[in-house]
Amino acid sequence: MTLEGDSDVYQAPNLVRRILSLFKNVRPGSDLTNFQAIQLPPLFNIPKSHLQCYGESVYAVGEDLLHKCNSAENSQERFISVVAWSISLARPTIFGCAPYNPILGETHHVSKGSLNVLLEQVSHHPPVSALHATDEKENIEMIWCHNPVPKFYGIKVEAEVHGRKQLKLLNHGETYAMNSPSLLIKFLPPGLDWVGNVKIHCQETSLEAELCYSTNSFLGHRGAHSIKGRIYQSSSMKTLYEVKGHWNSIVTVKDTNNGKERVIYNAKEVISGLKTPTVKDPQGVLPSESAAVWSAVSEGIQSKNWEKAREVKKAVEEKQRELVKDRNSRGQTWVPKHFNLSYTKEGGWDCSPIHTWVPPAPIVVPL
């Protein structure tokens, strides 16, 4: 992750030329979800899986935004805190580098204090990731279904993130449902941003938020990384608060009743000073754990031994193809271990956890 102005970050060489070369046989408007020709070589990878990145948006935080959501004194303050928490999920990324595509059945299980987070790759074609996180002390539950659909548009790729996120504050009997912004990858000029409309809704309180993530135009710089929106009462459509700022720096809300404005999100406080997860119980780490699946590839990337990284990454991918071929020959259907998965044309992909609470993990984040 990188904030505005950071320069000491890894960049693959000759980025634009190399990246555009991957799309030489792709037509503008094409769905890239199942386009095998753009499997990234290790030179373009950061040494972690997409599952780890999804999990990090929940547990890799410097400021405890979840506690703020739960401890706020009234429904409006809790909703404002949930809006701030949802903004924290849009993390800065590095142009030209991407995490590994998770293999089918890959898991990521991490604990931070009383918060336990479990993810599983529940589908490979199309890619669908599921997340279940619980905090028994705070009585909080999170359920996500995450299905990115990238499309190529000539000088950019936009990955729409389908699926629903739910945050449940069980002490208050409140469930907050929300969608995700899209990740925009621009080649000219090079850069990344989150774009699109996000809606947050709490049925129990009838409070809703509409947030618009926008980026700069081709020639100008106004609007880069920006957020603008409102919080309102769905019954009357009356705007209670105006939201504005930038998801990679500061976001404020202004009370439309009295004009008072305050900061609700500071990116530096949330994603600075983060601590690396450590293995507390080596025997408890499953073979499907992201760090175990990709360990040899990550070692090759970190040592810049690109030939080794390419060979072991190819071995991981070949093994998965062999497993798929074997299941097909036996007429077997793969079933997720931790989630029930469903699909409808109207609602898309959805998942529900099999267990009520996520157990403590063998991998922990120091407090």
Image (cartoon, rainbow, N blue to C red):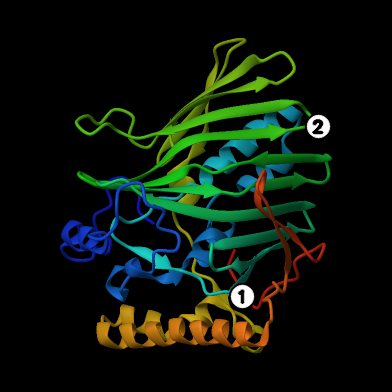
Q: What is the x, y in percent for residue 287?
A: 60, 85
Residue 92, position as x, y percentages in the image = 40, 50
Identify the residue shown where x is 44% and y is 71%.
48
Q: Name the N-terminal-most of marks 1 and 2.
A: 1
The quarter of the image holding the C terminus is: bottom right
Residue 317: name its quadrant.
Answer: bottom left
Q: Which mark is residue 140?
A: none
- Residue where numbered disc 1 is placed: 105
In the rendered view, tell whether residue 21 sits above or below residue 350.
below
State left or right for residue 171 relative to residue 52: right
Viewer-nearest residue: 345 or 159: 345
- 257 and 323: which one is in front? 323
Nearest the eye: 318 or 218: 318
Q: Amino acid at mark 1?
A: Gly
- Please state if 353 lies on the left or on the right of 290 as rendered: right
Give the image location of residue 283, x and y in percent: 65, 89
Q: Amino acid at mark 2?
A: Glu
Is 100 situated above or below 84?
below
Residue that label 2 marks: 204
**Gap in angstroms between the C-alphas marked 1 and 2:** 35 Å
Q: Is residue 182 above or below residue 38?
A: above
Camera-near label (1 vs 2) is: 1
Image height check: is 111 above or below 30? below
Q: Residue at x 64, y 38 (%)?
A: 82
Q: Quick one: label 2, few (<14), some, or many (20+) residues within 10 Å?
A: few
- Rendering quarter of residue 365: bottom right
Judge the density around disc 1: few (<14), some (14-19), many (≥20) Cα neighbours within 10 Å.
many
The residue sitting at 58% across, 55% down in the picture is 146
